[in-house]
Image (tube, rainbow, N blue to C red):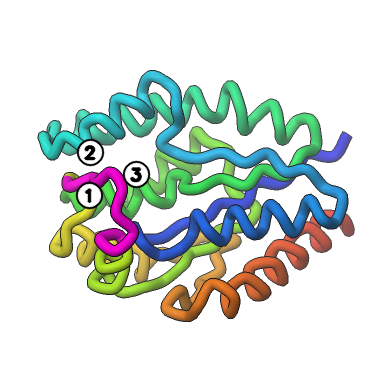
Amino acid sequence: MKRGALIVFEGLDGCGKSTQLRRAAEALRSRGTEPVVTREPTGGRWGLKIRAMAQSGERVSPATELEWFFEDRREHMREIVGPALEEGRIVLSDRSYISTVAYQGARGLDVEKILSDSEAEFNRPDLILLFEISAKEGLARVNARGGKREPVFENLPFLERAAEIFGTLEVAGLARIDAARSEDEIAPDVLRLITICLDDRSDV
């Protein structure tokens, strides 16, 4: 059986990636394909720990934060992503280790080391959709939508540092998308890139 495809949706808070993932999943279902939809941090014990920390506003050390993300991702790969890929499924993930590179890099950790360690250990995405938006606009969207806030991550100076790292990343399979547009303008570009990725794999 041919291995499945891992497609990840990345970007700053407020970039619209979760909305585009939902729309992409609906489009794939309309074509007769049922994707595995997942996210990081997960709903597992490490993911819940990360979310509780982010919402509390009480930071842990950057090294501890990084280890929590790695532990959460290990469970995610082992229990959800890896098995789905082995079954030949298409996996759509809201965030991956690319976010860890940018966000924990913005904490002052070594960006290149996070990236190399991640690529050595985890499933590499077949397609990385990076939704680009200014930190200021992203934060404005977060504030406008309401809901639970994550002040540890959702603050302008931090997001500006993360945006800078996202902007310099050069990794295989990365496609940059102008996320300042409306969701209806963005969605066809997302589906086109996913279709190209899947079509390219069908030729292998």
Q: Residue, x 34% and y 44% (percent of image)?
A: 114
Q: Residue, x 50% and y 47% (percent of image)?
A: 94
Q: Earlier in the sequence, mark 1 or mark 2?
A: 2
Q: Nearer the viewer, mark 1 or mark 3?
A: 1
Magenta portion: prevailing SS class: loop
In the rendered structure, which amino acid carries the disc numbered 3?
Ile
Q: Is residue 129 left or right of residue 158?
A: right
Provide residue 76's location: percent of width, then percent of height.
52, 28
Q: Is residue 128 left or right of residue 14?
A: right
Distance CA(mark 1)–CA(mark 3) = 18 Å
- Badge 3 marks a residue whose secondary structure is helix
According to the image, label 2 marks what residue? 54
Which image quarter is the C terminus in? bottom right
Q: Residue, x 13% and y 63% (percent of image)?
A: 157
In the rendered structure, which amino acid carries the disc numbered 2?
Ala
Q: Nearer the viewer, residue 44 or 145?
A: 145
Q: Mark 2: few, some, or many residues within 10 Å (few <14, many ≥20)?
A: some
* Residues at circles 1 and 2 in contact by the CB criterion of under 8 Å: yes
Which image quarter is the N terminus in? top right
Provide residue 119's location: percent of width, then percent of height.
49, 43
Distance CA(mark 1)–CA(mark 2) = 7 Å
* Residues at circles 2 and 3 in contact by the CB criterion of under 8 Å: no
According to the image, label 1 marks what residue? 153
Q: Nearer the viewer, mark 2 or mark 3?
A: 2
In the rendered structure, which amino acid carries the disc numbered 1?
Phe
Provide residue 140's location: percent of width, then percent of height.
26, 68
Q: Nearer the viewer, residue 138 or 84?
A: 138
According to the image, label 3 marks what residue? 114
Q: Is residue 37 left or right of residue 121?
A: right
The region drawn magenta spans 142-151
